[in-house]
Image (cartoon, rainbow, N blue to C red):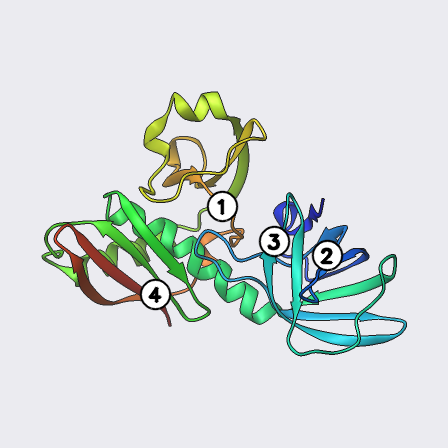
Amino acid sequence: MTELLFRDDAYLREATAKVTAITSEGGIVLDASVFYPTSGGQPGDSGTLSWGGGTLDIATTVKGQGDDLVLLPAEPVALPAIGDQVQQKINWDRRFRHMRVHTALHLLSVVIPLPVSGGAIAADKGRLDFDMPDAPADKAALEEDLNRLIACDMDVTAEWITEAALDAQPDLVKTMSVQPPRGSGKIRLVRIGVGRETADLQPCGGTHVANTREIGQVRLGKIEKKGRQNRRVYLHLD
């Protein structure tokens, strides 16, 4: 089982850890990880590992068996041994842009209050697919509303509820195709805002900025028709 250090502190850029396994494909499993794995539309982190015997670049991170995370080297090189202590360091600039885009997409789901059927995050842009039969009448107004929310200087925090509590509040789940992971008995929620000033609250396991001001100005890109009931809305960081 890999301890998810990024879950408690999305701003943690490096940490020491111990190698607990090497997969048959040459992936590296650590007992604790600052690397976020590909999931929820957010790409896995890249970065570096270093130890007494060498250094290697990590291309991406994925979920492994059970609760393990697997760091995938960028190229075939000598690997640390099981039991080695390593220093892990993420590509922070890339991760931070993912955090900005991810948080902005949560707010996009506020200004377009429709069910979400899909989404994806990149370092310079993101997109959400909405259950939206007709394209928005005024994209400029949506963009203005979104940037106004971002400028409200709202804190972004995480909290936990039980699976039963989530079942009693089904409106918290905005995604139609992806449901929050179950089995542990509790679900992580990401809240934007505080108390009555909450702008958004929904299940999410991804990494986010601590305050909306860190997102910066955004612009809405093209809106594509992806089906009779579906529109894809792109968001870009400025």
Choose between 6 and 148: the one closer to the eye: 6
Q: Where, quadrant-wise, is the N terminus in this rendering?
A: top right
Residue 57 horizontal/vertical position (percent): 69, 75
What is the number of the mark on residue 29? 2
Nearest-to-viewer mark from 3 and 4: 3
Q: What residue type is labelled 1?
A: Asp
- Residue indicated by mark 1: 155
Closer to viewer: mark 2 or mark 4: 2
Q: Which amino acid does label 4 sit on?
A: Val
How crowded is the residue under tag 3: few (<14 C-alpha within 10 Å), some, or many (20+)? some
Helix, strand or loop for disc 1: loop
Depth check: 93 or 163 in front? 163
From the top left corner, tell me how far across and down residue 106 is, in percent. 38, 49
- Disc number at residue 10? 3
| Quarter of the figure with residue 18 | bottom right
Instruction: Give the number of the disc on residue 218.
Output: 4
Q: What element carries label 3?
A: loop
What residue is at 69 percent from the left and 49 percent from the top? 5
Give the amino acid at mark 3: Ala
Q: Do the residues labelled 1 and 2 touch (CB within 8 Å)?
A: no
Left or right: where does residue 149 sit relative to residue 103?
A: left
Secondary structure beneath disc 2?
Answer: strand
Q: Earlier in the sequence, mark 1 or mark 3?
A: 3
